[in-house]
Image (cartoon, rainbow, N blue to C red):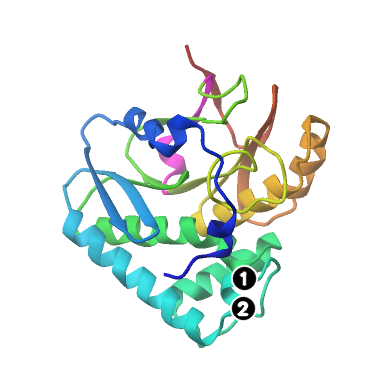
Amino acid sequence: MKKTARERKQPKKPEAYQARGYRLQAAAAGLVSFGVTVRETDLHILATLALPDEARHLVLQARSQLEGYIDHHPAFLTALAPLSLDPTAPPLARTMLQAAAIANVGPMAAVAGAIAAYVGQGLLAAGANEVIVENGGDIFMQRHQDCLVQIFAGASPLSNKVALRIQRDRMPLGVCCSSGTVGHSLSLGRADAAIVLARSTPLADAAATALGNRVQGPADLDAALATVQTIPGVLGAVVICQDQLAAWGDVLLEPLG
């Protein structure tokens, strides 16, 4: 896939992020761990079955849909605002266009969540009973037990000090994070972590971008959360900026350490 709008921003370089060290803490009882990398797409997968070939095939399918569409619709790659819905677009691109329209962002704001969900749903169809797909901090989850998702927030003193408890009856679920201080993704804000929960992982991804865009400092947290509450389909959100944390909705937080 060509360089995306989200990938053009030069990444910040804390060592743990560059080394994907957070993935070492993603072990889950009863699941096997494997990865799939295809150009910019770099997935960490936990599943009841080791299905790396199937996962790679799904990634190639997803990228083919998006690359073919972008070749004929270059604005899909660069737009920072919603584009018109296109009934002729391939399914994955339509999903991203819809999520972007709901969250009022550009369609590429949903790309990581869309690919995570596409691969996760495909692995479930291939025979895995439980699947977690993480794509650069954007997660598709389907488990039959409660899970903890540790929150990495860069240089914030709250980083790795709190986790989200995801209840089994809430899954399948998208848990997606945007950051203006960590990683490659384009954010117009300065949140260390802007996290959104939604049944639709592409929507969670797009809404996390919308949430993070509205945070320039700790004083903006409440107003940013008030905005994300108006996005249909969002179940809950957490935002961290420096030493401040705010949360709204269907969110269970647990201290760590």
Q: Amino acid at mark 2?
A: Ala
At x 71% / y 51%, what residue is drawn? Answer: 188
Q: How far separated are the C-alphas under marks 1 and 2?
A: 5 Å
Q: Is residue 167 left or right of residue 54?
A: right
Q: Position of residue 182 (x, y in %)?
A: 57, 39
Q: Of helix, strand and loop, which one carries label 1? A: helix
Q: Position of residue 26 (x, y in %)?
A: 34, 32
At x 65% / y 43%, what residue is drawn? Answer: 180
Q: Is residue 12 above or below residue 243?
A: below
Q: Which residue is mark 1?
A: 78
Q: Of helix, strand and loop, which one carries label 2? A: helix
At x 44% / y 80%, what residue is drawn? Answer: 90
Magenta stretch containing residue 171, yes or no? yes
Quadrant of the image occupied by residue 148: top left
- Look at the image and tell me whether residue 146 can be seen: no
Q: Which residue is mark 2?
A: 75
Quadrant of the image occupied by residue 12: top right
Instruction: Tell whether label 2 touches label 1 (CB within 8 Å).
Output: yes
- Look at the image and tell me whether residue 130 can be seen: yes
Q: Amino acid at mark 1?
A: Thr
The disc at residue 65 is: none
Question: In the picture, which quadrant includes the N terminus?
Answer: bottom left
Quadrant of the image occupied by residue 96: bottom right
Q: Position of residue 159 (x, y in %)?
A: 55, 24
Q: Is residue 153 left or right of residue 59?
A: right
Q: Position of residue 44 (x, y in %)?
A: 32, 45
- Residue range in magenta is 161-172
Seen as rendered, the residue at the extreme top is 257
